[in-house]
Image: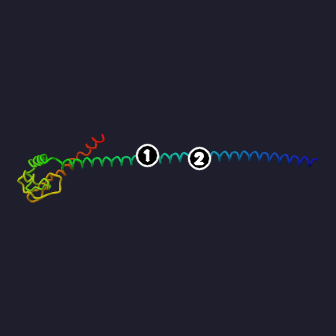
């Protein structure tokens, strides 16, 4: 009988130990599972935050790129319109009545004739220029109108062509023209 009690005590002790080890194992497994779930949640949260940050950055890049493209297109259209205005002005100058052309040439010559000894003009203006000045007519230049004065030793040339006057005025007034056209 004594041996049976000892065996029974050992079996009960072993069962208790197995139960305790199983409970500790379950607790440890539960703790590891919970830690893994928390780590998974944190990694998922970090991944979502990173994805959202990347998406926000990409969104900003797309918006910036689109804004630059819109500005480029707008500037190109403005340049086209300003070029059109410039070309229309050139056409208006070319189609001015002869009397107006003569009046303009006379006005410019009266102010600057003393600055030169030779004069050049476009083929169209040659007859008017010869009529209006006593300077030596030196030949034709490629121009929509006006003239070029040159001194005796050909070291100084004064350009009073409508082309250069228009270009100068256009460049000086570009901002003002743009403001008028585009507010």
Is 110 or 14 nearer to us in this picture? Answer: 110
Q: CA separation, marks 2 and 1?
A: 28 Å
Q: Would residue 173 be found to the left or right of residue 30 on screen? A: left
Going 9% across and 60% down the picture, which residue do you hit?
A: 153
Going 28% across and 44% down the picture, which residue do you hit?
A: 178
Going 71% across and 47% down the picture, which residue do you hit?
A: 29
- At numbered mark 1, what does the secondary structure look like: helix, strand or loop? helix
Label 1, on which residue? 63
Is 88 or 178 nearer to us in this picture? Answer: 88
* Outermost residue toward the left in this view: 134
Query: By what rule are the colours in the image chosen?
Result: rainbow
Q: Position of residue 28 (x, y in %)?
A: 71, 46
Q: Would residue 8 be found to the left or right of residue 96 on screen? A: right
Q: Position of residue 150 (x, y in %)?
A: 11, 56
Q: Position of residue 108 (x, y in %)?
A: 11, 48
Q: Nearer the viewer, mark 2 or mark 1?
A: 1
Is 80 or 124 nearer to us in this picture? Answer: 124
Of mark 2 and mark 1, the one earlier in the sequence is 2
Task: Count the labels in the image.
Answer: 2
Could you tell me which quadrant the C terminus lies in? top left
Is 103 or 61 nearer to us in this picture? Answer: 103
- At numbered mark 2, what does the secondary structure look like: helix, strand or loop? helix
Label 2, on which residue? 44
């Amino acid at each position: 009988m004594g041996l049976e009690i000892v065996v029974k005590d050992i079996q009960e002790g072993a069962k208790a130990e197995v139960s305790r080890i199983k409970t500790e194992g379950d607790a440890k497994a539960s703790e590891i599972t919970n830690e893994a779930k928390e780590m998974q949640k944190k990694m998922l949260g970090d991944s979502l935050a990173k994805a959202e940050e990347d998406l926000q950055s990409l969104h900003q890049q797309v918006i910036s790129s689109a804004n630059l493209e819109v500005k480029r297109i707008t500037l190109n259209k403005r340049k086209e319109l300003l070029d059109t205005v410039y070309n229309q002005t050139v056409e208006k100058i070319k189609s001015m009545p002869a009397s107006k052309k003569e009046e303009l040439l006379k006005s410019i010559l009266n102010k600057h004739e003393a600055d030169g000894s030779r004069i050049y003009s476009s083929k169209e203006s040659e007859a008017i220029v010869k009529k209006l000045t006593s300077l030596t007519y030196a030949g034709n230049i490629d121009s929509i109108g006006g003239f070029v004065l040159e001194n005796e030793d050909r070291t100084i040339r004064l350009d009073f062509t409508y082309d250069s006057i228009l270009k100068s005025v256009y460049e000086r007034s570009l901002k003002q023209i743009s403001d008028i056209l585009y507010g």
